[in-house]
Image (spheres, rainbow, N blue to C red):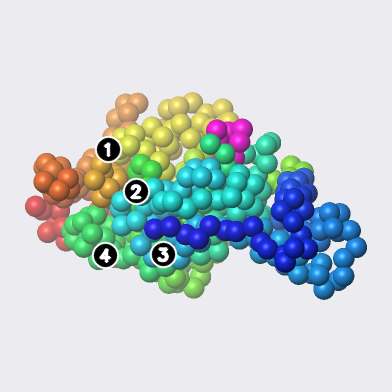
Amino acid sequence: MSAKKTPVVDLDGSLDFTKWNEILKLVFDKVDHEPPVGERYEHLLRQVIRSACEEVMGNLLKSRRVEIEEKVFAYVADYGPIQVFLDDPDVSEIMVNGPHQVYIERLGDLIETDVMYDNARHVRFAINHIINPTGRFVNIAHPTVDSRLPDGSRVNIVIPPVSQQGPCITIRKFLKDKLTLDQLINLGSLSEQMAQFLTLCVKGHLNIIVAGNTSSGKTTLLNILAGHIHERERIITIEDSAELALQQSHKLSLEAQPPDHHGQGGISVRELVRNALRMRPDRIIIGEVRGGETIDMLQAMNTGHDGSMATIHSNSARDTVSRLETTALMAGIDMPIMAIRRQIASALELVVHLSRLPDGSRKITQITEVVGMEGDIITLTDLYLFEQMGVDPGGKIKGRFRPTGLRPQFSATLESHGCRIDPALLRM
């Protein structure tokens, strides 16, 4: 379970512990003041290290100075003791709660490990090594950030003063072997009927929201569903941090960018959605809607970009509609709530809601049609449900997936795209 603790390097007596810490402190201060971000991350970081070593050590022989610089670089440009968990395929999440507490999720179990960082500064170096190459940074003025690892793993960073435990890292690892609908069926996440139905809905160009609570598998399902889009269609994905990995050849991936440390150059998801409309997309896929981009997404769905998809955090299909209303209002447009509801009702056709249940399992608990408006209420019809039927002696939730037997009103839309619903898919 444990990982080898990163040692303070031994420079054969020519650099004592005090000098080593002076160099690290100076490197940290310089990086915090002027982050080495973007594609030139390594080059800029090496410049900072060289400058710090010269200030602390004075004039050394070039060969000795280069040796010290390389050892400092190896310490600073590293993920630290969590590397062992990044390499472990059974570990799905890594949670660093300050320098002296690291949890992992392995095969569904949450486990406290005995690995530790040297100190808070050591964690901050690991954080910088994760986020600086992607153009992101953290400091006291900007203490939180979402980013990703080169393999697509999702990363969230929080540092003081927001975090009281010290700098924190949460990594949700990216699955190198992509899951399929068949695998989700085998895992008990949905039924074969539901899988066939969802495939028809994607091929039939329905506008779909994948919703659910935290860590319920929204992005995984979105990635799987988007994989059923026809190869000839032009797909544009828009994400805060790029995670989707579609296999189609005609796709463009757009990623939002935060402002730099001078407050310049930020590109929001909303700006990317607006820009995507000018790029002749057949499908627009938004990794997650959480703000004003919701209204732009709804308008895109209402203006000919059928078959678009997104995810959102919510607790049920009904709550999904409420969340869309709330996030649409964040656009700051002077639009009455009834107008927003009409936008949602006319744009959206299907809500697929996932839940992470208390036993750690992930299931599609609702597949719900957005029917339209009745008065001032958006009407919804459940097409499939997960019914919980108890808990077995091992603590695993028992239940069944069942269709409600109702035929969706969007059947004609599916048939216009050559996708006919087999009545057997809607029967128990």
Identify the element where label 1 is drawn.
strand
The residue where tag 1 is placed is: 380
Q: Is residue 310 above or below residue 182?
A: above
Work out which residue is located at the far right of the displayed protein and give it.
Answer: 59
**Residue 183: which numbered mark, if any?**
4
Residue 364 image point, x, y percent = 26, 49
Q: Is residue 163 found inside the magenta-colored segment of the image?
A: yes
**Residue 88: which numbered mark, if any?**
3
> In this picture, which residue range is highlighted in magenta?
158-164
Identify the element where label 3 is drawn.
loop
Q: CA distance from mark 4 to mark 1?
A: 29 Å
Q: Is residue 118 left or right of residue 261?
A: left
Q: CA distance from mark 4 to mark 2?
A: 23 Å
**Residue 110: which numbered mark, if any?**
2
Residue 336 image point, x, y percent = 49, 26
Looking at numbered disc 2 in the image, what kind of residue is underneath it? Answer: Leu
**Proximity of marks 3 and 1: CB atoms separated by less than 8 Å:** no
Name which quarter of the figure residue 44 lies in.
bottom right
Q: What residue is at 74 percent from the left and 56 percent from the top?
A: 16
